[in-house]
Amino acid sequence: MGFSYQVRKPIPNMKMDKRVAILLCTYNGSKFIRKQLDSITNQTHQNWVIFASDDGSTDGTLEIIHEYQRNYGEDKIVLLRGPNKGFAWNFISALESCGDDFDYYAFSDQDDEWVENKLSHALDYLAQNPQTPSVYCGRTILTDEEGEVIGLSPLFDKIPSFRNALVQSIAGGNTMVLNKQARDIVIETPKWQEIISHDWWVYILITGCGGDVHYDSSPTIKYRQHQENLIGSNLTMIARAQRIKKLMGGHFKRWNDKNLELIKPFRNRLTPENAKILSSFDSKRNANFFARIRMIFETRLYRQTWCGNIALIAAIFLNKI
């Protein structure tokens, strides 16, 4: 079965001087990390520094990183010690540790491969909103363990917003590139809090604070599917059914509990409209049935697909949100 996708052609620009920090978080990733490092070093935009934040690898990952350091220089590939608090905090920690001497910040998983113009496309978009906290993210090309294309991640066409972010993460962190304004907000995340997923948290926080999130329908990374993946692609009907089962089983409610705790310190940073949405969601999601129905109309929360919206309404009715 064949799958088609379009990768945009590079757009000539004068942004090659913009510095990009690439935050590559690793843990026992020796099996695939060479391909990812090669795809990064082959980017059309070359003004980057890789910050490899390792969470205690024991499988040869560090030796591979040292090899690339020798080949490209320690000024191009910097090794950091991860916080050992899980993958989400590894990314947030690296985002802070790399420093503020960069224009843009890109998250990178250890087992993907980037299309050669991934960075240039992200920068072309982010340059349009230099003063606004902005995040570029998008669709992915799904591959099997050997790198053969097996499909595409779901296409989402509804506008990214805080109303969506509260109840859905639309893009993997492996696609995200942040401008400095967005980065400076995210690194204020309280260190003692649990983060369900860094990509979902970035989506909630930046849209909540009035920032801009751009979802690119043209994929620029190859997302490798294998047994060790942290989070699946959500492509198959079985995977989607498992997501709905988690939603109805109480996982979704617990995730929302964690996200709402995370955003508490930022309440004064939210836009007035988003502050009202958050207040209604937080106060009524555990209230009686009629209060939860009022919440639907007050917040106008939505997911990206009709099936997702049906599941969302069902979760609200059943007090699973």
Image (spheres, grey):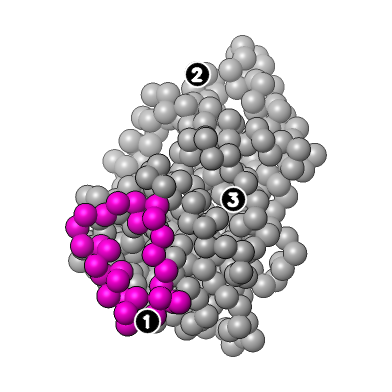
Dot 1: element: helix
Q: Image quadrant of residue 144?
A: bottom left
**In the rendered structure, which segment of residues is drawn in magenta?**
54-82
The outermost residue toward the top is: 288
Disc 2: which residue:
318
Cα distance in 3D space between marks 1 and 2: 55 Å
Residue at left 70%, top 26%?
Answer: 280
Residue at left 32%, top 42%?
Answer: 239
Instruction: Depth check: give the residue in front, 58 or 236.
Output: 58
Disc 1: which residue:
72
Looking at marks 1 and 2 on the same chain, the residue that comes earlier in the sequence is marked by 1
* Three-letter code for the amino acid on which mark 2 is drawn: Leu
- Looking at the image, is 169 positioned above or below residue 294? below
Instruction: Depth check: give the residue in front, 209 or 306.
Output: 209
Dot 3: element: loop
Looking at marks 3 and 2 on the same chain, the residue that comes earlier in the sequence is marked by 3
Q: Position of residue 131 (x, y in %)?
A: 75, 64
**Mark 1 Cα-neighbour bin, 10 Å: few <14, some 14–19, many ≥20:** few
Q: Position of residue 104 (x, y in %)?
A: 59, 68
What label does residue 187 carry, if any? 3
